[in-house]
Amino acid sequence: MADIIETGRESDTFAGDKPKAVKRPYASAFDRASYVFDVRRLTAICCVVAFAIGLWSMDSTTTRVLAVLLVLEIALMILPWRVPRTMRSGLSFWSETLVGLVAPLGALVLTAVTRPDWLSKGADWWWFVLAVATTAGLITLSNMRMKSLLSGELAFVFGPTPRAHGAARAFASAVCPAGEEAVFRAPVLLIGATTPLGLLGAIAFVARHHIQPGTNRRGTTRSTAVEISAPAALLLLTMASGSIYPALLAHVLNNIPTIVLELQRDDDDRGWS
C-alpha cells in the first residue's frame, strides 16, 4: 500500500489553483540486488576501453587525459543504478546523467585550457550544407515525424516525464554534441590520427550509450541503423572537411528534436527529493 499515493487534488484545491507537487516514496538510486551485467554491456565497455587505449598510445598529454576521462566515466556508469528510473528522485536521476557526461564535459574543459589546433580549423561553406543534409537523412532514418513533434502529439504518445528527469535528458542532449565531438572525432585532427583510431572512436561512440543499465529505447533494427549511420557520417564529415565544425553542426541539429520532445513531456507533479 505504500506505493499507492492519493493526491487529493480535487478536494484540496480551488478552481484556478495550481496543484501542489505530489510527494512520492522515491526509490533509492542503486539496486544491488537486481544488478545485471550482461554481454551487451561488457562488449560496450570493451569497445570504449579499446578506444581509450588507442588514445593513450598516441603519446599526447591531451589524448591521454581523454583516455583517463573515458575510463573514469566507465567506472561510474557501471555502478548498479536502479532501473526502471521512473520512480527515482530528480537528484538521483541527475546524478546518473552527470556521471554519463564525465568524458564530454571534461573534454570541453580540456579544450578550453589547451586550445588545440583543430579548434581554429574551419571548413568551406558547402560542408555545412552537407552537414544539414546529413542531419535530415538521420532524422528521416530514425522515423522522427517532425509534424507530430511540433504539434505535441509525439510527446503525448511517449507520456509525461518528471520535470527533473526531462530537464536532465534535455541538458545531456544539449551539451553532449560539443563534448562528444571533442572526445570521439577531434583526435582524428589533433595529431593526424590514423583511420583505425577514427573507426575505433566511431564504435566507442555507439558503445558508450550501452554501458549504463537499461535499454534506453535502444535495440530495435531502426535505432541500431541510426546508431551505426550517425557516427560513420560524422567521422566522414570530419575527415573529409578537415574540421570538426560540420560534424558538430550535424550533431547539434540531430539532437534538437530530442531536446524539444523532453521539454514537451514535462510533468511538474514530480520534484527533486
Image (cartoon, grey):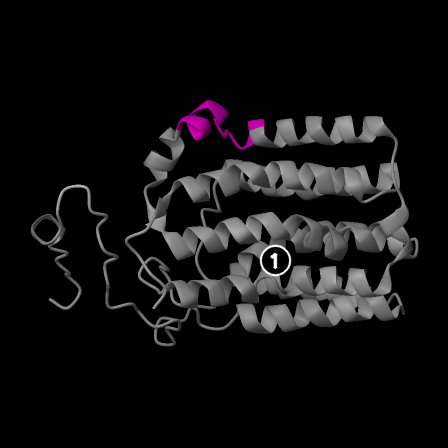
Three-letter amino acid code of the residue under disc 1: Arg
Can the viewer see residue 61?
Answer: yes
Magenta stretch in the rendered image:
140-151
Residue 105: x and y in percent read 66, 62
In-image side of 131 versus 8 (left or right) = right
Q: Which residue is mark 1?
A: 208
Q: Residue sitting at 39 percent across and 62 percent down?
A: 90
In-image side of 214 versus 41 (left or right) = left
Can the viewer see residue 38?
Answer: no
- Give whichever of 122, 100 is nearer the camera: 122
Specify the quadrant that holds the N terminus: bottom left
Q: Main secondary structure of the magenta part?
A: helix
Q: Residue sitting at 63 percent across and 27 percent down?
A: 136
- Kindly give the residue lying farthest to the left in the view shown: 11
Q: Is residue 270 above or below residue 249?
A: below
Q: Is residue 125 above or below residue 198?
A: above
Residue 58: x and y in percent read 88, 65
In-image side of 38 versus 182 (left or right) = left
Q: Residue sitting at 86 percent across and 37 percent down?
A: 240
